[in-house]
Image (cartoon, rainbow, N blue to C red):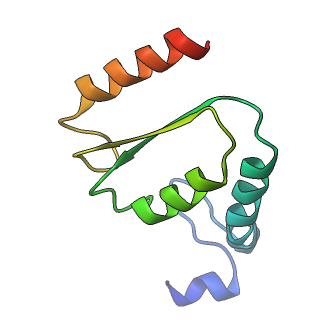
Amino acid sequence: MPASIEHGNIKGPWEINQIFFRELRGVDDEIGRIADICQTPVCIFQGDSDNKVMPEDTKQFFIKLPGPKKLVTVHAGHDYAGAEQQVLTEMLAWFSKYV
């Protein structure tokens, strides 16, 4: 990270300051709490070559969820490029059943 993060804000199209990084550190804890209290059917899509949300992190979160739940792993990255049809088909099937 740039040294300027330690001393103030990062400026560009958006301004990122120390508060952002403090809050970011708490996201994992919040996600864990969501899994503990979730009462809604959940379908998670994960790209097997996603480099933003690691597949192992998704699996750990998925395990914590109560049912009904489904984890769909697609051969794609974070944006599901090349797997759009599979994602849409699975998503529509899930919505048809639970929404």
User: At which x and y percent is residue 40?
Assistant: 71, 29
Residue 23 shows up from this direction: yes
> Which residue lies at the image location 62% right of the left edge and 32% below the top edge?
68
Q: In the rendered view, would you say 40 is above or below 79? A: above
Locate residue 61 relative to residue 49 in the image: left or right.
right
Along the line of sight, the residue nearer the viewer: 99 or 26:
99
> Which residue lies at the image location 24% right of the left edge and 46% below the top edge?
76
Locate residue 61 relative to residue 80 in the image: left or right.
right
User: At which x and y percent is residue 46?
Assistant: 39, 47
Locate residue 83 relative to residue 7 in the image: left or right.
left
In the image as oriented, which residue stretches furthest toward the left? 82
Along the line of sight, the residue nearer the viewer: 2 or 40:
40
Q: In the rendered view, would you say 29 is above or below 31? A: below
Q: In the rendered view, would you say 9 is above or below 66? A: below
Task: Classify residue 7 by image quadrant.
Answer: bottom right
Task: Classify residue 21 by image quadrant.
Answer: bottom right
User: At which x and y percent is residue 52?
Assistant: 41, 60
> Which residue lies at the image location 76% right of the left edge and 69% below the top edge?
19
Q: In the rendered view, would you say 46 is above or below 25? A: above
